[in-house]
Image (tube, rainbow, N blue to C red):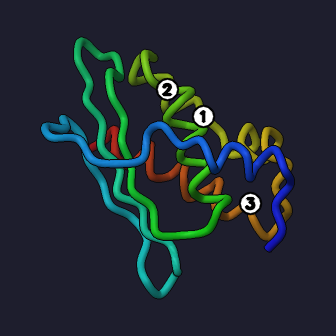
Amino acid sequence: MFYNDFTLNYFKDLKYSGSLVSPTHKAMIGSVKQEAIIKLQFVVKNDVVQEIKYKVFGNVALIVSMEYLANKLIGKKVEDINQINYNQIVDFFQLTPIQVNSAMMAVDAFKICIKS
C-alpha cells in the first residue's frame, strides 16, 4: 500500500505507542488472521482521559489512526470518545477506500476500551 508523505511523516513521530503501568481501562481487539491487533490502555481520572498508550500489529494506516485518536483525546472527557468518527481520520490522512477499515478499527478500539 502506498501512503502520502504527510501520513508517513506522522508515522515517524509516534508519541503514544507503548504500555501503561496502571491503566484504568484496557482492551485488545483484532486477530492475527485479520493481520491487525490493537492493545489499548487508558488512565481516566474524574471522567477525563489523562493518559493513553497503545501497541499495534498492523499497517501504517492503523498505527497513524491510533496515534491521531490518542493525540486528539488526551485531556478530553470520556463522553467525547463516543463522538469520534472514522471519517475524521480518513479526511485527515486522505486514506484510500482500502485503508478506511483501519480507521474504523481504531475508532472501535477506543469505544470498546472506554466501556471496559
Name the amino acid, label 1.
Answer: Ile
The amino acid sitting under disc 3 is Val
Query: Which residue lies most toward the top here?
Result: 46
Q: Earlier in the sequence, mark 1 or mark 3?
A: 1
Residue 48 location (% of width, % of height)? 34, 16
Find residue 111 and report its image quarter. top left
Along the viewing direction, whichever of 32 and 10 lies nearer the viewer: 10
Q: Residue furthest left?
A: 22
Residue identified by numbered label 2: 73
Q: Position of residue 113 (x, y in %)?
A: 34, 45
Q: Residue at x 50, y 52 (%)?
A: 108
The residue pinned by badge 1 equals 84
Pointer 1 with pointer 2, Cβ within 8 A: yes
Q: Which residue is mark 3?
A: 100
Q: Residues within 10 Å of mark 3 (few under 14, many from 20)?
A: some
Q: Which quadrant: the N terminus?
A: bottom right
Give 71 or 18, whichever is nearer the viewer. 18
- Residue at x 52%, y 80% (from the top left corner): 35
Q: Secondary structure at mark 2?
A: helix
| Viewer-closest of 35 and 4 | 4
Residue 102 x, y percent position in the rendering: 64, 61
The vertical placement of 12 against 52, above or below, is below
